[in-house]
Every structure is written in C-alpha cells, then in structure tokens.
Image (tube, rainbow, N blue to C red):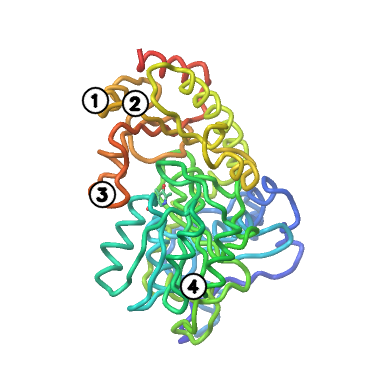
C-alpha cells in the first residue's frame, strides 16, 4: 500500500469490540481496547513480538496490520486504552504510544510547529521538556517564552496571535508542584489561535481530565504513574476528537486534523513503543485507579508530617491549604497526587536527608509503587541550572509510594533527626 498514513486497525462496532466510553474510569482503563484475543480467547492482549504481517494478496491486510512501526496489535490495545482513559465520558479521542515521554513530545512539536513559530512554556516545566524546546527546537528556528502559568495576565502577554502555535501546560509541575487553570489557559490559547497541550504526567487521567477542560492534546510520560512499577520507559499523546492544527497549518497528508498529523509523524519518525513495553504499560494502566488512591492518601500523610516537622523550612503539596494553588487543585483534580516537595533550609541538609532514607530510595523518576527521594537541583533538573527554570538548591522531591504509611513516616523521621 502506498498511502502516506499508516494503516490503523479496524474498529468494528460489534459485540467483540464493545463501546466502553460511557463507563467509569476504572472500567475503561481495564476494558477499553482489551477485547479477548479472537483465536484463543486470551483475556489479556498478547505481546505481538513481531515486525511484519502476512498479506493475503498484495494489500490484503488482516485487520489493517502491515508493519509494526505503523501499527502493532499490542500497541493498538495500549493506544485505545490510553485514549479511553483521557477522553471525556461519552466521547472519543486518539491515542499514540511512544518509546518515551520525550519521544512523544518531540513528535508532537514536529507536527504542530514550523520554523519561525513560537511557543509558550511554563517557567517551571519538567527540565527535559525545556531542554527539548530550547536546545533541540531552538536551533531549528522555533522561538519560546517561559512564563509563570499561574499568572494569566503574563500568559496573555506572552501569547503572540499569528506566531504562537502552542501553549504548553504542565500542572502540577515537576518539581515545584505549581497548579494552573487548564480551562482559563485553553481559552487564552484558543483566542490566540494556538493549541493547548497539557502534560498530565503528575496528575494522571484518574485525577485530572484536561480534554474535558479544553485541552487539544494530552502528553504523558507513561514511565511514571501509568506504568507505575519503575520497569518501563514510555510516552503517549492523546488528541481530542476534532482538534485542528494551529494557524493555517496542514499536515504533510493535506488534512488539518491534529490526530492525523500525529499519526503521520509517529509513523514517519518512528519513535514507537515496542510490543513488550506497550504490554507492561497496559498492565500498569489497569491498576492506576487503586494505586492513585493509595498514593494520594500516603502523600497527604507525608505532607502533613513534614509540615509539622521543625527541621523542614517549607512543604510544597497542592493538598495543603498553604499551597497557593490549593483551591484550584481541589476544583480541577479529584485528588492531590503522590508527589511532595520540600525545602530543607540548605543544600547540605537536603543532600544529607537524601543520603539517609532507607525506605525512600535515592533515585530519579517517580510514580512507581516504591517511594523515591531525590535532589532536583543536582539530579533531574541539573539540565536547567543557570536558566530561568533553575530550582532552589535546598529542594527535595519525594515520590510517595504505596508502602505502609507508618514505615514511610518513620523513615523520614529518622532521616530528618
Ligand atoms: C519524566 C517526565 C517527562 C519525560 O518523560 P520520559 O519518559 O522520561 O521521556 C515529561 N514530563 C514530565 C512531567 C515528566 O515527569
């Protein structure tokens, strides 16, 4: 077949492929795209560890599969499940799975930007996102402005109608847990002719549904909560039904449909999730709801404990009333998440605490079942040192896991003593 679009598998409306779009979150996360396998009835999508598919005569594809960069059944199952998890109830969206969160971001930015375009990014964005925008896309003629997304007037001033194509939102942010108003930002972006992209990695679709609030695209590092077990790196894009490319841009296939452009670029640059990685990520997604409930509860207890501890200068957690985004987070999210940051008072103290925990493992990344501790200034956010995105040197970031909370509190108590 010589069409430019990869083949997408058929999605027949028959009893073997039911519509889960009106069911609750946990039901969708477990069932959407997970039809029992036709030949054996296997209840979990198998790992189709295969690169190519026999054709019944030239172009006679079975179910649309031709080559695994374009589509693979295990990846399709994940892409449908991710789309169902992010789509507002009763609607659809299109999902795309990648080899990492940054691969997903790179593909999206290539699809929506051209040389001379401008984008607005959070001044406390994930460091890797900022590095991609500033140091990879910058030399290709893409200009950016970093702005505080909690200041809507500043965002409005940074958007240049006709030149700004993307407003990039991350909420809560990594690692400073800033909370910004997705609905208001969507209005500002759309008035300026830009698309609204939300990195939903920290909140997950269980706690926050950006498309229902006006986002055109949701980005994930599925490495984090969706995978949930620190055993796989992956990323995803979920494009809202009907989302269009910004300005007068059309995709290389000639359409203005943003999901078609994402599909074209996913296939053309090929940073796709492999079958085993897709399978592990799917396995994680099925338990996301129950894991997040425990992450929320444990993080709230940890934040409370640290807030009352005399050795801690400041605790940053959207669930605390002292957090400037607390009210907004309470409206926009259905829980405050599992990430807690705090300021130890000095870099030396921060480094000492990081060295002394036993249950909290000193490591980068987040969102797994096990608790992690890290020093953003020297670890995850080292790449933004010296930029507007530099983080305080006494900052410690906790990814609060789902262990017994008493053990987590005792570990922190000992490390702070
Ligand atoms: C980790 C992370 C990314 C990048 O994802 P990778 O899977 O590491 O490429 C993007 N955004 C946020 C908020 C992250 O935490």
Q: Secondary structure at mark 3?
A: helix
Q: Kindly indicate the quadrant of the structure image that contains residue 32.
A: bottom right
Residue 326 vs residue 415, the one in the foreground: 326
Label pair 2/3, CB-CB below 8 angstroms? no
Say whether disc 1 or disc 4 marks the residue closer to the N-terminus. Answer: 4
Q: Disc 4, ligand 1: is the CB inside 8 Å?
A: no
Label pair 4/2, CB-CB below 8 angstroms? no
Label pair 4/3, CB-CB below 8 angstroms? no
Residue 376 vs residue 176, the one in the foreground: 176
The crowd level at tag 3 (other Cα within 10 Å; few <14, some 14-19, many 20+) is some
Q: Position of residue 5 (x, y in %)?
A: 49, 80
Q: Residue 383 has which mark?
A: 3
Q: Position of residue 195 (x, y in %)?
A: 51, 69
Spatial CA distance of label 2 from label 3 is 22 Å
Spatial CA distance of label 4 from label 3 is 30 Å
The residue indicated by pointer 1 is: 348
The residue indicated by pointer 2 is: 344
Q: Secondary structure at mark 2?
A: loop
Say whether disc 4 or disc 2 marks the residue closer to the N-terminus. Answer: 4
Q: Secondary structure at mark 1?
A: helix
Say whether disc 3 or disc 1 marks the residue closer to the N-terminus. Answer: 1
The residue indicated by pointer 4 is: 263
Spatial CA distance of label 3 from label 1 is 20 Å
Residue 278 drawn above or below residue 342? below
* Camera sees residue 51: yes
């Amino acid at each position: 077949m010589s069409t430019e679009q990869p083949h997408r598998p058929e999605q027949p409306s028959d009893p073997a492929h039911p519509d889960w779009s009106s069911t609750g979150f946990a039901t969708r996360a477990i069932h959407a795209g997970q039809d029992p396998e036709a030949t054996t009835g296997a209840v979990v999508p198998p790992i189709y560890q295969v690169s190519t598919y026999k054709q019944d005569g030239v172009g006679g594809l079975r179910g649309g599969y031709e080559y695994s960069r374009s589509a693979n059944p295990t990846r399709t199952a994940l892409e449908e499940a991710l789309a169902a998890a992010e789509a507002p109830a009763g609607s659809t969206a299109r999902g795309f799975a990648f080899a990492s969160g940054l691969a997903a971001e790179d593909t999206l930015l290539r699809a929506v930007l051209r040389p001379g375009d401008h984008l607005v990014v959070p001044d406390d964005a994930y460091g890797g996102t900022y590095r991609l925008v500033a140091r990879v896309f910058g030399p290709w003629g893409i200009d950016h402005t970093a702005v505080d997304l909690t200041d809507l007037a500043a965002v409005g001033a940074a958007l240049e109608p006709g030149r700004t194509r993307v407003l990039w939102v991350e909420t809560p942010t990594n690692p400073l847990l800033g909370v910004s108003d997705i609905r208001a930002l969507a209005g500002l972006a759309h008035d300026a002719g830009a698309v609204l992209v939300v990195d939903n990695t920290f909140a997950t679709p269980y706690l926050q549904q950006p498309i229902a609030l006006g986002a055109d695209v949701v980005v994930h590092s599925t490495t984090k909560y969706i995978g949930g077990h620190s055993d796989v790196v992956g990323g995803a894009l979920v494009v809202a039904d009907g989302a269009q490319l910004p300005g007068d841009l059309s995709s290389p296939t000639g359409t203005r449909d943003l999901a078609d452009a994402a599909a074209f670029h996913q296939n053309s640059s090929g940073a796709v999730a492999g079958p085993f990685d897709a399978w592990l990520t799917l396995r994680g997604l099925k338990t996301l709801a129950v894991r997040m409930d425990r992450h929320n509860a444990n993080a709230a207890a940890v934040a409370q404990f640290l807030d009352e501890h005399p050795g801690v200068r400041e605790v940053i957690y959207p669930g605390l009333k002292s957090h400037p985004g607390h009210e907004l987070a309470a409206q926009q999210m259905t829980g405050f998440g599992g990430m807690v940051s705090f300021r130890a008072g000095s870099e030396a103290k921060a480094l000492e605490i990081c060295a002394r925990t036993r249950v909290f493992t000193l490591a980068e990344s987040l969102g797994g079942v096990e608790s992690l501790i890290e020093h953003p200034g020297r670890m995850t956010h080292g790449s933004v040192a010296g930029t507007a995105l530099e983080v305080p040197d006494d900052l410690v970031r906790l990814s609060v896991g789902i262990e017994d909370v008493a053990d987590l509190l005792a570990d922190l108590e000992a490390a702070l003593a």
